[in-house]
Amino acid sequence: MKYLQDRFLLLISIPHLIFFGYKLIFGSYFVAVDSIEYMQMAENIYQHFSFYIGDLSIPINPEFYTKRPPLYSIFILIASLFLHSKALVLILQNILSIASICITKRMFEQHYGQTNKWVTYAFTLTSMSNFIYANLLMSEILFQFLVTLLMYCAHQLLTHHKRTTLISYQTVFILLLLTKPVFYLLALPNLILTYLFARKTNIRFGTLTAILPLLAIIFYVNWNHQRTGSYDYSSIQHINLRDYNLNYFHTYKYGAEHAREINVAIKTQGAAQSTYAEKVQITKQVALDHMLKDWTSFIPFHTIGMLKFFIDPGRYDFFSFFQEQPKRMSEVGFLRHLNEGGITGALHFLGTQPLFIIALLFITLIFNSCKFFGFVWFWLYNYKTASFTHWIMGLLILYMAVITGPLGAARFVIPILPLYLFFAIYGFSHAYQKFKRYRFRTT
């Protein structure tokens, strides 16, 4: 047993080391605008104690106060020894990535027994986006570790019934809120979940601990209001709604020109408002009105995005990691080509990419399809016997797919990748065993 665990640890450490070595020698630590914003906030915190992602020497943009929650920039600041070494941040991220996979493996093995080692090796080693984001200044790996830690707290809580574990669970939940905005929508469902935890563990007044994340949200939103005048959790919400969800949908249904016209019109309408709060409100309202007006077309489009969430091989991730920064910043991505030119346009775009990246994409696509098959198979055969913790994990994966929607891509799977990975491993292994038994009976 220990030999297998040590071998697995060594196996997953090797690709992390390879990607880290490559990035250390050849590449930039940044990807697109996200990394630059996180780094800028870290510098602003260190130099001015200002939680702002822009240049403080030019006029202030209120969106830049709330676009990125502060925890990852604080993580950069501390891990880099106050901005002395970006490489130290990557080292810590690789450790967190390896820890997330190993912790999740242990949780699953305690309930379902040993995994099929070959399926485990194959599925883990082809999850290459994970190795990529462990070696970029992006919040995905920290977020992944916190998600894993949250599930581990839930697992330990239901096993040992300790009040301190429940408080630890709520503390990790708050840290997740401060890492990415996507988790704040789960604060109310967390009330129900905490009530169920309290009932299952007989912890007196345990449900009251769910107030802690709600208080954190209230404090954070009020802080944002003091800085921007808007009771907004994050400006990324209305930015994504306008520039990605609606824009991609209009490009898909009406064409690129129509999408650009609507996008410009919404921005113009927002700019005409007298306050930032009114700009946020009108942007959300107009974007949602467009989607609701076309809801019969938007729902299938959103569903396709959810499927991409599971299948996407990560063209953007590979290209961002292996290509030079200036090319990345101006490059129009695969999703844009797919929405504008359909499958023909997307294939033509892929044909312009380096052969090495195309080969990696093809391999990853095959294994991602196998993982999705394994994930679905797992729930088809285990929905009655899955533990309460595994149901929480499964619903969290589904939530991430739904909330990502039209943006569905490999990058957005990273936070829940270890959980998804082991559902897929056990499901695919079970399907393979059934297939072998079927073949044995028919020969």
Image (tube, rainbow, N blue to C red):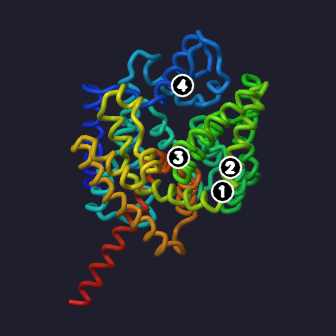
Alpha carbons under labels 2 and 4: distance apart = 38 Å
Identify which residue, 275 or 36, lies in the foreground.
Answer: 275
| Among the two numbered marks 3 and 2 on one chain, the one whose residue lies closer to the N terminus | 3
The residue most toward the bottom is 442
| Among the two numbered marks 4 and 3 on one chain, the one whose residue lies closer to the N terminus | 4
The kind of residue tagged 4 is Ile
Residue for badge 3: 147
Q: Determine the residue positioned at 58% across, 31% down.
A: 68
Residue for badge 1: 294
Q: Residues within 10 Å of mark 4 (few under 14, many from 20)?
A: many
Residue for badge 2: 290
Q: Determine the residue positioned at 33% across, 41% down.
A: 318
Residue for badge 4: 74
Residue 233, image quadrant: top right
Q: Residues within 10 Å of mark 1 (few under 14, many from 20)?
A: some
| Among the two numbered marks 1 and 3 on one chain, the one whose residue lies closer to the N terminus | 3
